Amino acid sequence: MRGLAVVMLAASLALLGGGAATTAVRGNDYAAVALNILPPGQSGSLGFGRNSSDQLPLFDGLTPLGANVEARDLTRFFKPARFGLGSEKAVRTDRPKEGVRIVRDRWGVPHVYGSTRGNVHFGAGWATAQDRGLLLQLLRWAGRIAALDIPGVNPFAVALSGRRFYPSAQTEAVLKAQERLVSRQGPQARQLLKDVDGFVAGINAYYRSVGLGSERWQRVDVIAVVALMGAYLGLGGGDETRRSQFLSALERQLGTARARSVWADLREKNNPETPVSIARRFSYATAPAIGAGSVILDDGSFSPSGAVSAQSAISAWPTKASNALLVSAKRSTNRHPLFVAGPQVGHAYPQLLMELDLHGGGIDARGASFPGLSFYVLLGRGSDYAWSATSSNSDVVDHFVEELCGDDLHYRYRGSCREMETVDAGSLQQGQGQPDRRLVYRTTVHGPVLGYATTAGRRVAISSMRSTRGRELLSALMFQDLNTGAVRSAKTFLRAAAKLEFTFNVLYADDRDIAMFSTGRLPVRAPTADGSLPTLGTGDHDWRGILPARAHPQVVNPPSGAILQWNNKPAAGFPASDDNWSFGSVHRVDLLNPGIAARRKHSLATVVGVMNKAATQDLRAVRVLPSIAAVLRTGAAPSQRADRMLALLEEWRAQGSSRLDRELDGLVDHPGAAIMDGAWRGLSDAVMVPVLGPLTTRLGALQTWSDNASSDGSSYGSGWYGWVEKDLRTLLGRPVRGPYSTRYCGGGDLAACRASLWAALDAAGAELAATQGPTPDAWRASAARERINYSPLPATMRFANRPTFQQVMTFRGHRPLIRPRR
């Protein structure tokens, strides 16, 4: 996301505005506490001002407190999120047209008031263009790439690079067809189109007001941006081709039977030890992974259709939106639910999200939104409830293997030979004097052709099918319900959430209840194929429908009195998608569970404290180190240095495993962090190499060894944590549910495993000693490399694994139910 700032500076686009100040009127607001944070700030303009980075010190100020958060700290490190201005004064007011008033507070948040619903959306469009004008332009064109799933092109990377996509008439016709689809879905969907019309009118009016010659926004631009948001955060699956080739490599190395057992271990489709947010079991996609409809592609055989790398053509996008801590009324000190939640969408300037406060014509909502879809608040609050979301990564994308008929342009489907269709999507700007690249690809009944491969030596085509393609805008219906107050209870929230077709875990709290619903237009697959591998595309194994809402993971007021979500598995029995091999025995949600379980009753401050402590903890030390240490302690260390390294790791864990730099000297305070960073890959490889051998590195390409302190601000969402922990726990003879089929470390021999782990630790010690001196107690990991920066803003902050936009909410009452006259 850093590239976006460079693009904005180079564009020299001045976004102007003005107006006189006035006082805003607050609507019905039943919140007892309403706070939020969205660093670095509301402004996205090229000229840095107060609102460019004024929320960053608040976000950073909370971090060093760890779990020691008091009630007074909430208002010190979060800003007000009430409806309207509350006790604050208006800084400026815009009146872009009669019936529309936009009042800015000291944080730059636009409080939009409209005399009609259309005027509210007009004001939202005006404020969006004012705050994220250039970003809107970048997203609208790249979004068309996402809507069509153009093979081998990452639309978000295109947007952030500043390159322009020039859509063809064929592309625009695809988006126009979605308009017609939405218009046929009933009154609520037709109202959605009217809301979009008001929004694009506001965008266009703002651009005219400042003399910008931008191409007029239309409905199709909004559809494109919705598709981009869904592809970035609401997608799961679509990596079967790479995983299948890895299985082929395993079979060549280990033999068919053993390879398939190992592959199932690594797949972690339904590990019974995986932490879940909902204890109740929801069974889905229970077919065997390798049925008659599943295909194993020959290793190394895939070649992409276009001028792109094989990996970029087929690999899935990372999705790490997080996290949510909800405590029910029975466990709350104020006897009302507690809500601390928000998404992690990365740190950048300008911030990808923006904040809005919308009122009028039946709209009452405040929170964050994705520019271009910001006619509704996407994550925020209504009068008497709050909601948020985390990416669920549920499986909505499958690869199909098309049998070819005679040449590469014909394939067999339902007994006949069909010709592939050709899509000329348009041209993509390349930059640096290069000619624009024409994006032309072929499609089958299942979707775009990604490329070609072989299975048992026979050439086939690979196509990609996504359940939400061509219907992205319909997902906005959930947000319409939440913005208009149609949600009046946890039960009506579940009904609204079922309308969201992208893959999210949506969280909710009012003054009585907490709830969660895991969304997505989830395919019901044929009993012969489950989506873990590519599916044979002859028609016999096609999808059999869409999973009904009642079968989705969902809960209201669970017996535990809490709902914790950090992109972990939503519910027991609900399988991981094909591109997600990290639902093992260890997950980062494990960092939240102990803090919530430690108290019978919580306040908002204690819940924030649990979140804040976890934000700087190293999951490897908290959850995996005990098993590593237990194996190592069964024998003597190979050197005094290695023995001291292990002691320091255990000391660090006992002190909380924090990666904080409290002294701000650019170094993580405890040497344990440096030791873990230096030793982790070697320790992980020591566990897996006895079985995988040279394929261990290949596994690392599918599943990173560790994503600690990742640049987007979200860590420990994927890694080898569960594989290492569970195998070592099994080796030690400790209780294990659903043990792996294979013993990995030392081939199941404790002495051999211990020796390999000590050797890995000692080797890491030698490397650290060469760069930092012989004394382990003096070693330090660089905190400077982990700091979050917002270039080109001259500001950085400590790394903290927290949501980008975070709400802290509790409600004291609710709207009276309006009963219809008889």
Image (cartoon, grey):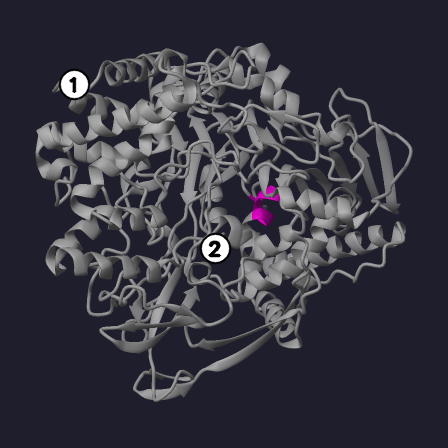
The residue sitting at 11% across, 40% down in the picture is 747
Q: Nearer the viewer, residue 273 or 498?
A: 273
Q: Which residue corresponds to mark 2?
A: 501
Instruction: Tell whether label 2 touches label 1 (CB within 8 Å).
Output: no
Q: For residue 820, what is the image quadrant?
A: top right
Vertical relation: 154 (above or below) 174: above
25 drawn magenta: no
Mark with earlier residue (1, 2) = 2
The residue sitting at 50% across, 18% down in the picture is 667
Q: Is residue 75 left or right of residue 722?
A: right
Q: Nearer the viewer, residue 158 or 805?
A: 158
Vertical relation: 612 (above or below) 309: above
Q: Nearer the viewer, residue 621 or 255?
A: 255
Vertical relation: 801 (above or below) 300: above
**Residue 435 visible here:** yes
Q: Nearer the viewer, residue 91 or 486?
A: 91
Vertical relation: 556 (above or below) 799: below
Q: Nearer the viewer, mark 1 or mark 2?
A: 1
Can you tell which mark lies on residue 352? none
| Spatial separation of the CA atoms under disc 1 and disc 2 | 50 Å
The part of the chain drawn in magenta is 479-486
Q: Position of residue 280 (x, y in %)?
A: 28, 39
Q: For residue 554, what is the image quadrant?
A: top left
Q: Position of residue 157 (x, y in %)?
A: 58, 53
The residue sitting at 48% across, 18% down in the picture is 660
Q: Position of residue 822 (x, y in %)?
A: 56, 48
Q: Amino acid at mark 2?
A: Glu
Q: Is residue 744 left or right of residue 558?
A: left
**Residue 814 visible here:** no
Q: What main secondary structure does the magenta stretch of the protein show?
A: helix
Q: Position of residue 254 (x, y in %)?
A: 14, 55
Q: Which residue corresponds to mark 1?
A: 633
